[in-house]
Amino acid sequence: MKYKTFLWIFILSMISGIIFLIFYLQAIFSVVKYSAYNPEPDPFSIFEKLFTPVVIISFIVMVATSLTYRIMGIVAVAKNKVASGGEKALWIVGFVLLGFITGIAFLALAKGRKLVEQETETSYTT
């Protein structure tokens, strides 16, 4: 696994999470405002306000990228020959239970602890 790939997927997951949070909170506030003016709100209009295409798409992207970087982290740690068994177990449990925090720690420590492959520069001579 390449470090840059993990980094880009992690960043994409965070951006889609922020977009989801912003638009979902906006949808919740619009439902509250709608319910305040309508004593008997229509359930279909509430559903329509909560689940807009932006909310659905950002949620799907957030879940897919979050799952992807967690799996990538688990595979990188499991294949690593430098880390001990207990350290591998802690990383795996961390990715399963606390993916965001473990992802940040993995990004900070992965290169120094040799948990990921280093990018090699290729030079071409002619």
Image (cartoon, rainbow, N blue to C red):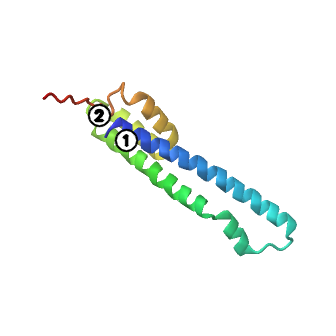
Residue 91 numbered tag: none
- Answer left or right for 10 relative to 43: left
Q: Residue furthest left?
A: 126
In this picture, is 64 found above or below 98? below
The residue nearer to you, when weighing 19 against 125, is 125
Q: Earlier in the sequence, mark 2 or mark 1?
A: 1
Q: Check disc 2 and report its element: helix, strand or loop.
A: loop
Amino acid type, label 1? Thr
Please tell me whether residue 8 is drawn above or below residue 46 in the rendered image. Answer: above
Location of mark 2 (residue): 117
Question: Looking at the picture, how far across and down is residue 19, in whole percent?
Answer: 60, 50
Q: Residue at x 85, y 70 (%)?
A: 38
40 to the left or right of 82: right
Disc 2 residue type? Glu
**Crowd band around label 1 with a 10 angstrom C-alpha radius: few (<14), some (14–19), many (20+):** few
Quarter occupied by the C terminus: top left
- The reply to whether the C-beta atoms of the residues labelled 2 and 1 are less than 8 Å apart is no
Horizontal relation, residue 13 to residue 113: left or right: right
- Place residue 107 in its image quadrant: top left
Q: Residue at x 31, y 31 (%)?
A: 84
Task: Give the percent coordinates (x, y) of residue 82.
Answer: 28, 29
Local SS, label 1: helix
Q: Nearer the viewer, residue 19 or 124?
A: 124
| Real-space Cα separation, disc 2 to disc 1, in angstroms | 11 Å
Q: Quadrant of residue 50?
A: bottom right
Query: Residue shown at 31%/40% (left/top)?
Result: 1
Please tell me which residue lies in front, 117 or 16: 16
Residue 55 in the image: above or below residue 73:
below
* Residue drawn at 45 percent across, 54 percent down: 64
Residue identifier under label 1:
5
